[in-house]
Image: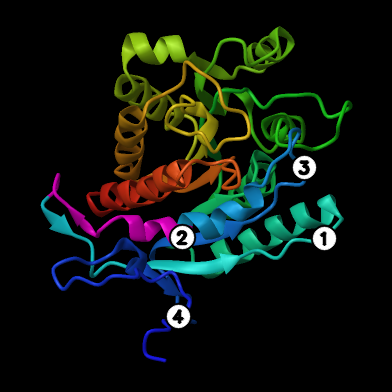
């Protein structure tokens, strides 16, 4: 019986010289939580295309054990840190509006009870960003968004209702977010309609294409985005749609395509944003583990969590 390990996310092999990153995940206790928190948002039924993104939060947690807690870049070991795992928000089986309502009320409650915590939300498809940010805005005051995405996600709501293609349109039309406080990075050729690019420009959305990223560099763009945003807002919310990545680096996205970011660009970006004190939350969305190859996309998401934590530890 001793050879039948308890089923958990723990690494199967232990080495006294290595601490696995999965050990950073700690169950929520009843004290006021500070530092980094994790909230799963397993909803993918509003996806325009077939999506098993509801399986992503659990898979990303498992992939934390693909990495150690030691950063050779910083020569620091994070093994004494902790990421408070709040678990997954329970979704309604059939009622999408009810699921979005649950997301908003749950996030509002978490942020209210733990005001010093910086939450990382693991989606789910991109539809979850609308209720999450609505709650975030209520609790954190005037906020802006930095969105990594191949798509605008500014589709109209008449043709299909709230979906993973509409979250930022919803936020703008409801007056939760001003268009000028939305910075989109990585928008890709042959992935959007002219109507939605025009709508974004009319609303004052700042649009940076992948060509802009190639020509100017991700850090230069982000430095400018943060500087300009903080002239207008108090806090920044980061929304990371993993399909901003080139399909070679994120094969587990429902909407894969060529011409996107590589892993190095993303790691640089997340590290930078982790170090920015006004960045108070981030979501990671649009990973379908059922489509992935060797969990490559979920591994990159887990690596992004660790990269954000490393940046966060360097905040002044």
Residue at the spot 33% in from the left edge and 12% down from the top edge: 216
Q: Earlier in the sequence, mark 4 or mark 1?
A: 4
Q: Residues within 10 Å of mark 2 (few under 14, many from 20)?
A: many
| Magenta extent | 61-74
Q: Earlier in the sequence, mark 3 or mark 4?
A: 4
Q: Residue furthest left?
A: 75
Tag of residue 46: 3
* Residue 47 image offset from top left, x and y in percent: 74, 38
Distance of mark 4 from mark 1, alpha carbons?
Answer: 32 Å
Q: Earlier in the sequence, mark 3 or mark 2?
A: 3
Tag of residue 61: 2
Q: Residues within 10 Å of mark 1 (few under 14, many from 20)?
A: few
Q: Which residue is mark 4?
A: 31
* Residue 159 image offset from top left, x and y in percent: 88, 26
Q: Residues within 10 Å of mark 4 (few under 14, many from 20)?
A: few
Asked if the residue at tag 1 contacts the one at tag 3, i.e. Cβ–Cβ closer than 8 Å, the answer is: no
Residue at the spot 51% in from the left edge and 34% down from the top edge: 251
User: Element type at marker 4?
Assistant: loop
Distance of mark 3 from mark 1, alpha carbons?
Answer: 12 Å
How many labels, in total?
Answer: 4
User: Element type at marker 3?
Assistant: loop
Distance of mark 1 from mark 2, alpha carbons?
Answer: 23 Å
Image: 292 above or below 158? below
Q: Is residue 72 magenta?
A: yes
């Amino acid at each position: 019986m001793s050879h039948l390990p308890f089923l958990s996310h723990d690494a199967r092999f232990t080495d006294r010289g290595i601490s696995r990153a999965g050990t950073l995940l700690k169950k929520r206790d009843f004290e006021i939580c500070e530092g980094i928190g994790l909230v799963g948002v397993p909803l993918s039924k509003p996806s325009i295309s077939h999506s098993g993104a509801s399986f992503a939060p659990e898979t990303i947690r498992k992939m934390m054990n693909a990495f150690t807690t030691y950063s050779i870049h910083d020569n620091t070991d994070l093994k004494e840190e902790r990421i408070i795992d709040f678990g997954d928000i329970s979704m309604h089986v059939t009622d999408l509006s009810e699921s979005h309502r649950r997301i908003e009320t749950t996030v509002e409650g978490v942020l209210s009870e733990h005001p010093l915590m910086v939450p990382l939300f693991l989606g789910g498809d991109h539809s979850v960003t609308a209720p999450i940010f609505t709650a975030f805005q209520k609790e954190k005051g005037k906020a802006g968004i930095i969105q990594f995405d191949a798509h605008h996600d500014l589709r109209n709501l008449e043709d299909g209702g709230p979906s993973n293609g509409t979250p930022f349109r919803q936020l703008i039309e409801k007056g939760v977010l001003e268009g000028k406080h939305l910075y989109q990075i990585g928008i890709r050729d042959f992935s959007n309609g002219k109507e939605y690019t025009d709508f974004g420009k009319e609303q004052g959305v700042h649009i940076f294409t992948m060509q802009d990223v190639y020509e100017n560099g991700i850090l230069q763009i982000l430095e400018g985005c943060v500087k300009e945003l903080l002239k207008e807002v108090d806090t920044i919310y980061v929304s990371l749609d993993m399909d901003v990545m080139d399909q070679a680096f994120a094969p587990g996205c429902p909407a894969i395509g060529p011409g996107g970011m590589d892993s190095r660009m993303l790691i640089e970006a997340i590290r930078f944003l982790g170090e920015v004190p006004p960045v108070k939350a981030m979501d990671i969305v649009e990973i379908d583990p059922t489509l992935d190859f060797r969990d490559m996309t979920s591994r990159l998401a887990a690596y992004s969590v660790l990269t954000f934590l490393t940046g966060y530890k360097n905040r002044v």
